[in-house]
Every structure is written in structure tokens, then in C-alpha cells.
Image (spheres, coloured by chain):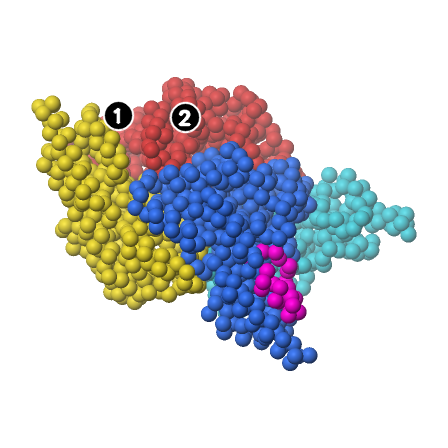
Chain colours: A cyan, B blue, C yellow, D red
Amino acid sequence: MIRFNNDYSEGAHPSVLDRLVDTNMVQTPGYGEDEYCLMAADIIKVLCGTEDIDVHFLVGGTQTNLTLISAALRPHQCAVSAASGHISTHESGAIESTGHKVMELPSTDGKITAEAVRKVHLAHVNDVTHEHIAQPKLVYISNPTELGTVYSKKELQELSEVCRECGLYLYLDGARLGYGLTCEGNDLDLKTITECCDAFYIGGTKVGALFGEALVIKDKRIREDFRYIIKQKGGLLAKGRLLGVQFLALFEDGLYFGISAHANRMAAIIKEALKEAGCGFLIDTPTNQQFPILPDEVLEKLGEKYAYSFWQKADEGHSAVRFCTSWATREEDARSLSDDISDMMRIWNAKNA
Amino acid sequence: MIRFNNDYSEGAHPSVLDRLVDTNMVQTPGYGEDEYCLMAADIIKVLCGTEDIDVHFLVGGTQTNLTLISAALRPHQCAVSAASGHISTHESGAIESTGHKVMELPSTDGKITAEAVRKVHLAHVNDVTHEHIAQPKLVYISNPTELGTVYSKKELQELSEVCRECGLYLYLDGARLGYGLTCEGNDLDLKTITECCDAFYIGGTKVGALFGEALVIKDKRIREDFRYIIKQKGGLLAKGRLLGVQFLALFEDGLYFGISAHANRMAAIIKEALKEAGCGFLIDTPTNQQFPILPDEVLEKLGEKYAYSFWQKADEGHSAVRFCTSWATREEDARSLSDDISDMMRIWNAKNA
Amino acid sequence: MIRFNNDYSEGAHPSVLDRLVDTNMVQTPGYGEDEYCLMAADIIKVLCGTEDIDVHFLVGGTQTNLTLISAALRPHQCAVSAASGHISTHESGAIESTGHKVMELPSTDGKITAEAVRKVHLAHVNDVTHEHIAQPKLVYISNPTELGTVYSKKELQELSEVCRECGLYLYLDGARLGYGLTCEGNDLDLKTITECCDAFYIGGTKVGALFGEALVIKDKRIREDFRYIIKQKGGLLAKGRLLGVQFLALFEDGLYFGISAHANRMAAIIKEALKEAGCGFLIDTPTNQQFPILPDEVLEKLGEKYAYSFWQKADEGHSAVRFCTSWATREEDARSLSDDISDMMRIWNAKNA
Amino acid sequence: MIRFNNDYSEGAHPSVLDRLVDTNMVQTPGYGEDEYCLMAADIIKVLCGTEDIDVHFLVGGTQTNLTLISAALRPHQCAVSAASGHISTHESGAIESTGHKVMELPSTDGKITAEAVRKVHLAHVNDVTHEHIAQPKLVYISNPTELGTVYSKKELQELSEVCRECGLYLYLDGARLGYGLTCEGNDLDLKTITECCDAFYIGGTKVGALFGEALVIKDKRIREDFRYIIKQKGGLLAKGRLLGVQFLALFEDGLYFGISAHANRMAAIIKEALKEAGCGFLIDTPTNQQFPILPDEVLEKLGEKYAYSFWQKADEGHSAVRFCTSWATREEDARSLSDDISDMMRIWNAKNA
């Protein structure tokens, strides 16, 4: 069984793992106050183009989201997210568990627009009963989104502008950020994201690390006492060095971007095969997640050899599924999948012509 | 200015107030352990047709909802509500504040169906990633709904059956229950509601009391230690007797139902005038809330004399508004409003013919 | 049975109740935005000596404490209280329920000192692991305390100064404030309290109202959006006017202070009798709560006629109990209790000489 | 600088790390549903002597504590802990953050007794106002405690019996469990702990793993839906295999116990030197944490070469500090520290004779 069902099926990129092995017996202070964390944070600050940010290393994405959001909001405030956003759908109510509503905006492509945010804000302030309604205060976006799509520089800047005008925080979940920053057509970079967002995180778990997310916080109110809140929410790793070491390996010479680009290339191979086979897509995406619509018969057969994720029924006889590549995907596996798709679709098309 | 904007513009029905005055200097134990509360609970048990329930008296609706729901759910569980439900829209994130997501079901009439509940439940248990998703556990409905509509006996029984089959709690918010139980076409009563629901409350605040809601809990798991949770959430009134005395006055000889029927009659007068004037309605409702669509011009003029609630824009030039009657609405005021609507609409129709 | 077990055994002072009756059928806006609330707030602002405060009316003390404290703190911050403080001992974990620890300071008289607060603050900031420890941010005191004692002006000013120096909020729970401000030896007044505290509440429930607490907030950070948080915590009374009307009756001509002084006089009668009978006290208090130590035999006999609260065992054969007077205590009842204490103690002393 | 300030200064035991390296490129399902986790859980079940438990792997101790405790308690219930317990003192209010009070019991040696637990329980149920007080429901102990002491089999069995009689959960925090189970005089083992406790965790972070705690849950109510709650609290590691692999390496052939015993031997070397040098101890402990009282002058000098943790001032001129050994402590370092202590104390004693 070859796994394309997600981007965390393996351990870490070998260079990351080597670094953990090399530093294993070095004694360091705990809780992220070691040299490796400091160095990794410094490199990230350079890439973000400013010293005036805090960088914290946490273990996982849900943990990062709930810690940041609960640190940012007062009790009556809520986060605004696309209905498909990870905090809305796949964190078992983690944000609500910290006391805050997640207000969902409809979205077909996983993104939300500046206009939609402004509308939500105005609807709230103009409602005479607004004190009876959870107050939108933080806009949560992900890049790439849960559907593999990415924001353009212009879109992000517009969102940023609206958030500033409306007094909202803008927070970007970058669980797969590497894949977004290296995909075809992308015009975003860490500097722009830092300029536009009050906080965001650079995902390691899905991009070469064993685990770990680098949370960048620009807003001074959220930065205050943030380590207390990491600790309180259970996210302060005793051997914080493990996070510093990994992000050092990923960022000191661009490994993060190189392996992300690789994953996108692998996805492009599969995408090309799907298009040539005449498959439709739930959505067009330039990153490592592809959402083709395939005949259930073909999917069943593919499933004997490859793991993929079921997404949703498309119609009687077809389903949308997700194929995911990663830094670890071998080209031979991507080509093998592509070939099998081509073959099976050819047969299926012939049978159903 | 005559107020039709809500059903809590006055104090209490005079009989309720008299009883408070009469008992004012009697010394009683605190926190709802007095004779009045016991007697009122006993009467409610008789009306509900069973001794095997607990009756608690709380001060307000949001308080009652958040106390009951947080007592019923484990951390990962969520409440399911119509998108228009009070807990979704008008409680400032009170349920989320206790740690629980409110999952919204689309609804055009404020009600949710047994079929929709079953679908949500099955979608959850059949999702292979369900541990990553908040678990639907409690179904929240209101009767009448926020849109003035009511459930039929058959609808409630179907909901109840589905909830039992799926292991879900069914909880009914009866902030305006009196108006629902006395409206034209209603076939529900307290006995049926008790049979169908795991918990529900009989609203006093909007039906003749100064304040107060009588919460009936049937499910034994929720009943356990419930007074601790009332206290913890700030809902245990020191002079709990005030609640007992009021519900005694409302229920010992049927006052609650009589004044509710009155409010519905007053609403029917206004509804009739609106229909005769050719107005459309956002929704057809048999209870004390009416949602007509009126020309903005007419609304402006009406607004000089009557308070109503703006609901939503209907089209360029028209808006849906809410007129609310209550136990306190005087027939002369209902007729005055009706006459003014007739007159103004006649003029407006002539002008716009 | 004559009740001296607490100060909320009756309804409201007749003048308060009359006002509720008089205004009962007046139509007002809901949720505390009526004329009565505005007028009552204005009077309280005058008494507090400044316009630059917000006044909110809530229903009960636990509700007020949890709403204020959760509005003031970020997630990692905690409240500091005497171990005997109401939030530590008698609110079923209400503060923790909003996510915040209550850090207890030992105290023999229910009060905490400026020195103890400074020590706690310094211990925290000087601890190198302080990010692993809940951060003290709000000092909770009550006046009178749960043991009936009161702060002097000097003590409160010192507390205030320390709190400002250490960046802590000072919050005073005034559930029984009237009894404190009118007791023998008191040198505090509302102006001084307003100068010293960031927030405090003037208790109505135990001092003449049916229910209700007037929360005064001076700190601007806590004031922001405070009504949202009242709503979210279930404390925004639909008929908020009921609170305004009652505080208007209590404060427009000094009724609050007059009836408080009465309660203290009644307590003094009982205290005098106890002292003359040679009883010891758990603590010496000038307010409406008296904590004598009496022989269990005498207590049992007294209990046939009078309700009191058991406090704690003093030794084999003696217990400390609480006698509480209130605005409603009749002088004949206080004298009857005093006489019975004198008689029973005389007999007991003779028997045990 | 040689670190004796804690037991998490290095990475992982080489055998653990090797196993991570060996399995790095194997593809597995995510979130702990892989073969390694299953195998590790099976081994732990064998060691615990029963199949009728659930084993979950989490990343850190605070996370494990807050997840377990919040899963076990209803809103009004609280955890009971020694005042020195980790959840009381060093988790930044993590338990309170999930809504629950931590009730502190005084303790001089870090342990709590069956008698103290019974007393707390009885005090609660016998208090007529108990509904106003957070309800003790879960007893939290740690073994070894934060002070390095351990429970005897008899003590744990008595605690267990009292908890069952009183309807309380017994939960054991085993962050340093290996050091406890292999120390001189210990008569506990995993089977007995499983019999006595409703839940406990076997700490990996401080005993040879990079990170990770194996949580064993016996009580069926807590077990239900537990993975949802791990996810919600941010503790469900995407690459859960990393935890399974590490615990497999630690437990498949007894490595865990071997390296724990080593740490205790290293501590015994240091302890012996301290005793011979005539030092007192804050407390006598058989495990890897030693709490000697040393002259400040000596401590300052030692601090130039060794890291240790300041614990508390003992008197003018002396302080209690903590020396910690671990699986990673080299005997040469323990001996070097011991020698230096002997030398410095000899000089100091001579000077101060």
C-alpha cells in the first residue's frame, strides 16, 4: 500500500532527523529557552524581515490554533473562519473548548474575501442587539486552505487592510505553508505574510519535521505573557530544543522550501495524469492536495494499491477524493499512481462510452 | 409610544405581583429550598404528568440554557440547533463560553426535523475522522421558535424518537411556551413535552412573571448534582422564593395559559388587519410574534406611535418587522395599531397603485 | 421560628417593593437600557464622586463576581483572595469555571493586607519558573468580609497603592457593603472605595432589595464591551428595569444606609447580650454578622426558637455559630433573642460552675 | 557546565532514538492508529496485568493531566491535590483553564493520606451548604511526588479503598514513575498501580524518551470517547507513531526500568556524599531528586560548574536546592559533583567551625 492519503505518513526529512541525532546528548535548558530555539527564531525573523515579532515553537496545529486564539480574544469575542476551515470542522471543538465561538462564513474554495469580512463586521456593529451576539474579533484563514487553494498577495493585503480598519486580528494557519509558498502562481512570501497578519504559523509537521509549528506573533497585545498561555494549554514542550533543532534544519539553508516544491511537483504529475484521463476536479489547486472526481469503480480498484482520502460523493457513481503528496513522496510512486489512473480510466471510459 | 417590540416591556401580571407583595415579609430558607418553590414544583409535576422529574427555577433564559447544556455535555460534545436558534444567534456565545460548540442546522421556519437530526448524527458516526469533530449530543429546539412557529405533536414525537435512537438529548427552550401551548392549531401539552424531551423550560419572563424560568429535567444523568451547577453558573437566586411564588401564581389556577391565550388573540387581531391590508409575511405564525412585510414608508410613520422590531430588509422599499404582543397587551392598543395599519396601507396602496 | 441564619430571609424593604408595584405597568426598553437604570446609575455616580465609571446592575453576587473577574483576566491570570473569601469557598468553583485559578492567602480575620499582596506578587515575578505558574492579576477582597470584619480607610488605601505598583486590579465584593459603611468605627465611604478600587459592587440582595447588585467599574480595560460579557454569562436581565427601580428606591434618599445602620444596631443588641453572658467570639465584628461561641447545649435549646448558622466546632461542648441581622430584623426579635441568650447562659453557667 | 537542574536536559536514550531513525520512512496511519502504538499499548497492558484498560500516548505531562482531568469531571467537580502537586503549582492554571478547581491539601512530604482524603470528602458531604462548594471528585497524586518521595503499596491501597468508598477517582501522575518503581524500598509495580488507580500515566519525557507519556485509563466512564478529548485539547499528535515507537523501545525489553535504576544509583552517590559532608536535607528521598540544604557560599561556588535548581531559603546563609539525575547522568559527572561537594564542605566546615 502506497499512501497518498495525507502528508504526515512518514517521520522526518533525513536532514532533520540527522540533526536531532547529532544534538541528542547536548545538555540544554528546557522549555524552548535553549540555543537551538533562539537560533531558529532568529533565522525566521530574518526571513520575515523584522525583529519586532515573537517566534514560539509548538508541537501541533490544533494546539497552536487554540493557544493563539484564546490568547487573543476576550471572553465575548469570536473567530471568523471559512465554513471549511480547520478550526470549524476538524478540531473537535477545540476553540469552543477555550470559550469562543467560531463564526462560519460560506466559501466554495476554502478562502474568505475582504468583502465578506467587512460585511460580517458591519452586520455586527450595525445590529442594535449586538451586545447579545458574539463579537467577531479574529479572522482565521489558512494558506494553503483545507482545499489546497492559495491566497494571492493582493487578496491577503485586502484582507489585512479590512481587518485593520475594522479592528480585527488576522491570523493565518500555515500548517502546509511551504506547499503554498512554492506552488505555481504564488506571489506571497514570509515578509508579506508578516506585514499582513497579526500572527501566523509556519507548519513543520506536514513539511519535513517529526512535528512542530513555528508560531510568529506580531501584535503586541497577543505577545504579552504568551509563554504562560502555551504552558497552560499543555503546549510547552519540556525538551523544547527538539523544535528548535528541527526548524533550524528546515530553515538554515532553505530545505523547507526545496522539499515543499518537490511535493508540489509530485502533485503536478498526478494532476496532469488526472486531467489527461478526463477527470473533473472538486476544485483546481496548485499545491500538494488534489481533489479529483473519479468513478467509484476506479476508486475501489485504486484503493487496493494506494491510500487516498474520501472527500464527498459527487454523484451516483462518482466521488471526490483527495490525493496528497509531501516532501517524502517518491517520484516513482507518483508516476506509478499516475500510470494506474491513466490505465484504469482508459478501461473505464471504454466500458462506459 | 406603544410598545409592540417585545414581550417583556412591562413588569409582572398583577396577580403575580400581588402574591410577591403578600408574601414579602414571610421568612423562608434561601436558594429555592422554601415552601413556595416546593409547591410550585409540585404543581408543575402534576401538569407534566409525572413525579419522576426535577423542577428548578432560574432567573433567565440564557442562564437556563447555558446551565442545562453545560450540565448535560462532556467536553467534546456539542449542541445542535437551528441556525436561527437563540443559543446560536442571541446569547453572545454563552454556550461556547462553557466550552461547547453549537452546530447549526439550516432552517427556514425556525424548526428542525427528525430527518435532519438523524442525518447529522449519521454523518458524524460514519465519518472516519469523527474523533476530530465535535460530537453532536444534544438537540436544542424552541417552541414557539424564534420565528413564532410551533411544533406539532407528531413532529415532536418524531424528534424524540430519533434522539433516543441516536443517543441524543432533546432539550426544548420554552421561553414563550405559554404562547405556543395556547395558539390555534396547537396539539402539544406539558405531558407530551415531558414524554418527548429530556429537559425543557417553561418561560416565565415573557409570560407574566417579573422574571423566571421553570426548568424541568427528566434525564437522570443531567439531574445529578444539578443545583451545584446552577450555583456555579451564577443562577442560584438567594431569595429563590421569588421564583416559587411567581410560578405558584402562574400555575395554581391556570393563569399562565389564560394570559398566553390573550396574547395570541391580540396578535390575531393585528395579523388579520395586516392580511386585509394585503401585507405579506416573512412567515405564517399562530403565536404572539407576527412578522409582516411592510413598505418602509409606512413603517416609518407607524414608528412614530408604535415600537416594533426591525427584522430584515425584504426588498428595495420593504422590510420585514416583528410585532409582539404579550399577556400585557391591551385590546385597545392592538386595535389602534390594526386601524392605523389599515389606514396607512390604504393610503400607501392608493399612492402606489 | 425566628430566622437569624442569614440576611436574605425576607423579600424586599417595603419602599423598594412599593416602587416596583408603582412602576409595574410602565413600558420600558429591556436589558437595563431604561430610564430607571439610567437614573439609578447617575445617583450612584454622584455618590461615588465621579462620572468616569460605568455602573451595571446584575442579579446576584456569584454572577457579578464571575462576570467581572472573567472580563478582567487573560487566560493565564488568576485572582488572589483570602482563603475564606466567597469566591474561594462558596461559589461552587464559579471563577474556575470561567478558566481562572483562585489563589488563596491565609487570613484569620477574612482580610488581606497590602504586605501579603506585595509578597505574593514579588514571589511570582522573582520565581524563575513563573511562566509555569498562574499569574496573580486581580486582588479580590470583600467588605465586610465573610467574617463580618471591615477594612479601614488606611488599609484599603495601602492595598490600592500596592495593587497599582504591582499592576494588579483591586476588586471589592460589597455583598453586604451597606452594613460595612454604617458600622461603628467605619471610616470608608463610596468615594474612597471608588478611588481605591478598579471595580466593586454595592450589594442589594442582602440590603433591602428583592435581588440585585450594582457593579461599579472604573478601569477602562474592564469596562470595554462589558455588557456583552454580562449577556454571555447569563446575567443580563430582560426586565433590567427591576434592578434600576430597586436601586433608585434604595439610593435616591439614603434608604440603603438607614436600613443598614438599623441592622447593625440590631446586631449590637445581640452582641451586647452575648458579651454580658460571658460568651467568647470567633472574631470581633462591628457589623450585622456575629460569631459567638456558645455551649452546644444552649445552642440546641436556642435552635428550637431561632434559626442561626453553624460555623465550626470550637471545642468539645462548644461551637461557633453565626447570628445575622438585616434591614428586616425587628427590634422585638433581637431583644427576644438577647433575653433568651441571657437566661439560658445564666442557667448553663450556674449548672457548670 | 554540567546540568543536574532537571531530568530533561538531553534528548532521548540512544536506543529510543535509534528506533525512531530505523522506522523513519515507514508509512503509517496518523493519530496513533499505527502498529507501533498498538504494540506498545499491548506491552503496557501485559505489564499492567489486564486487557481491560485503554492506553493513550500523549506528548507531555501538563497536557496529559488537563486532558484526563477534564474528561473525568462534570463542571462542578474538582480535583484534590497536595498543595505541592504539579497541577497546583506548576501548570499555569491548566486545570482551572478547563473549568475545574484544584483543592489543595497541606502536605509536608508531597504525599496525601487516605485519612486526609476521607476527611475532605466527609467535610464536603456533611456541609449543609455543599451545593455552594466545588465537589471533590478526583484525587490527584504523583509518584514519585514533586519532592521525590514515593508511596508504599499499603499507602496506595488505602488511598484506593477510600476513593472507592467515597466515589472519588484516583489518578496518579507518573511523570517520573520509572524512578519511583526502581528506587530502594519501593514495593509498588504497574499491576498494583493499575489495580489501585482509575487512571495513571507512565512518564516518558523524563525517563528516556524525547517526549511522551503513556496514559492508562481503567475507569469506563473516563475511557468513553477519550480520543475526542485528546484531539480537542490539542494533544493528538499527527505522527502518533513517534510515541508508539518510543514506548516500544522503552518497554519491550525493560529498558525503562534499567535506565531508571541507573538514575537512582547516580542520585544515591550524590546523596551519600552530601550525608558524609554533614548536610541536612529538606526531605529524605530514595529517587532521582535530592533536596540538600547547603551553605549559600558553597552553592555559589558549585554553581560555577554545575547547574542545580534553587528550591527555597532554609535560613540566613543556607538554601535547599534540588540536584536531579536522570537516565542520562554519567557516573563520572555524579562522582565529580560528589567530590566537589565533599571538598567544598570540608573547607566551609573548617572555616565555620
Q: Are marks 1 and 2 on the same chain?
A: yes
The reply to whether the magenta stretch includes residue B283 is: yes
Q: Amino acid at mark 2?
A: Cys
Q: In this orientation, does residue A269 appear?
A: no
Residue contact at pointers 1 and 2, CB within 8 angstroms: no
Q: Chain of mark 2?
A: D
Q: Looking at the figure, which quarter contains the C terminus of chain B? A: bottom right
How many neighbours does mark 2 have within 10 angstroms: few (below 14), some (14-19), or many (20 or more)? some
Earlier sequence position, callout 1 versus callout 2: 2
| Element type where label 1 sits in the image | helix
Q: Is residue D107 above or below residue D59?
A: above
Q: Which residue is mark 2?
A: D166
Q: Which residue is mark 1?
A: D276
User: What's the residue at 19%, 51% (across, down)?
Assistant: C261
Vertically, is C102 above or below A130?
above
Q: Give the chain of mark 1.
A: D
